[in-house]
Amino acid sequence: MAVYSSLAGPQQQLTFFTLLAREFGVQGIAFLVRLRSDLLQLLREQPGLPQAAALRALSQDLRSALARWFSVGLLQLQRITWEDTPGQLLERVMAAEAVHRMQHLGQLKRRLQQSDRRVFAFLHPSMPPGLDNSSSGPGSVACFYSISSGQPGLSGVDLGNFLIKKAAQQLLAELPQLQHLVTLSPIPGFRAWLITKLQAAAAAAAGGSSGAASNSAGQELQLLKPHEADTPVLLRLCGRYLLAETRRGWALDPVQHFHLKNGAWLWRINTRADLSAAGLERSCGLMVNYKYVLADVTANNRAYLVDQRIAAAAELRRLLD
C-alpha cells in the first residue's frame, strides 16, 4: 500500500496495474479481477478496518483500470448452447444466474435446448469464462428475462448496457420479424419500500411505537397470497414506487435505474409473474417489462440522466391518477 499510495495521477496508477498484471503472465487480468473481488468482500465484512479508506480508494482505482481493459471493443459476444459451449462455462452460467436460479445442470439444459430461447455471454480473451447473459423468444417479441455477472471483481464496470444492445442487434439480424424488445425484470426494492410505508402509516394511525408497526406490516405482507398479487391497490402502490419514489432524482429501484439509464421505456407491471419464495419476498410476485426501442435509446438516456425524467408508458402513468 505504501508504494501504491505514492503514485500520483490515473496514468501512473494504470501503469502500476499494468505492470502488476504482467507479473502474472496470461492470468494477469484475471488476478486483478480476483483482487478487486477480494477487496470488495473484505470491505463488506470489515468496514471498520484502519486501512478501509485506502482500500476503498484502491478498489475504485482498480475499477477504473478494469473499465478500460473491459471496454466493449475488447469483449466477444458469444451465444451459449448446450451442445457447443464448454462445461466450465455452462457451470458458471448456472452459478451466476441471479434472477431465475437453477439447482442443477438439468434445469440449464432444458433452458438452452428450448428453440425459443437464446443465451449470450460477453467474454474477454484474457479471462476465464465469465458471464453476463440474456435470453429471448421467437415471433415478434424478444424477452430478455435475466442478466447476470459471473465476476464479482467487475462490479461497477458497466457491461450490461453493452450486452443488451449487442444481443438486440444480433437478434434483429437473426430474426428480422422482431418488433418488440422487452425485459422481464424483478423489482427487488418494492416489498421493503412497501413495508416502510405501512410502518409509517400504522405508527401514525396508532400513535404507537414504530417497532410494533414494523412487525404488523411484515406479518401482513407475509400473509399475502399469490392470487392476491394482482389487486388494484398493490398495482397502484407499485406504480407509485416506480414512478414517484426517487433518491436524489434517480429511480429508487436499482434494476429500474439500470434500465432507465440504458435508455429503456418503463412499459408494464406484470402480476403473479414470480411466485417463487424469492419473488414474493422481493416484490410480492410482481415483475416489470422495460422496453428497448433502439431509435429512442439515446433520447430516453438523456431525459433520465440529464433531466431526471422517466420514459414511461401512458398506461403506467394512469396508475398515479
Image (cartoon, rainbow, N blue to C red):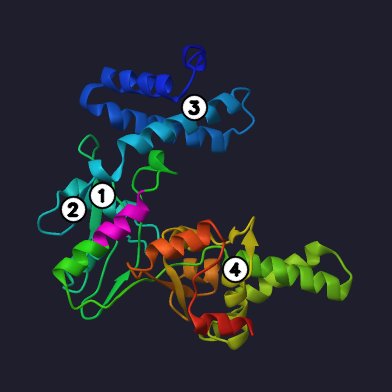
Q: Is residue 108 visible?
A: no
Q: Position of residue 30 (x, y in %)?
A: 30, 32
Marks 1 and 3: in contact by CB < 8 Å?
no
* Horizontal side, residue 65 vs residue 172: left or right: right
Mark before the other along the chain sequence, 1 or 4: 1
Marks 4 and 2: in contact by CB < 8 Å?
no
**Mark 2: amino acid:** Gln
Residue 78 is marked as: 2
| Residue at position x 56%, y 61% in the image | 307
Q: CA distance from mark 1 to mark 4?
A: 32 Å
Q: Position of residue 224 (x, y in %)?
A: 59, 79
Marks 2 and 1: in contact by CB < 8 Å?
yes
Q: Which residues are magenta?
A: 159-167
What secondary structure is found at the residue carrying circle 3?
helix
Marks 4 and 3: in contact by CB < 8 Å?
no
Residue 122 is marked as: 1
Q: CA distance from mark 3 to mark 2?
A: 32 Å
What secondary structure is found at the residue carrying circle 2?
strand
Q: Is residue 28 visible?
A: yes
Nearer to the camera, 122 or 199: 122
**Mark 3: amino acid:** Leu
**Mark 4: amino acid:** Arg
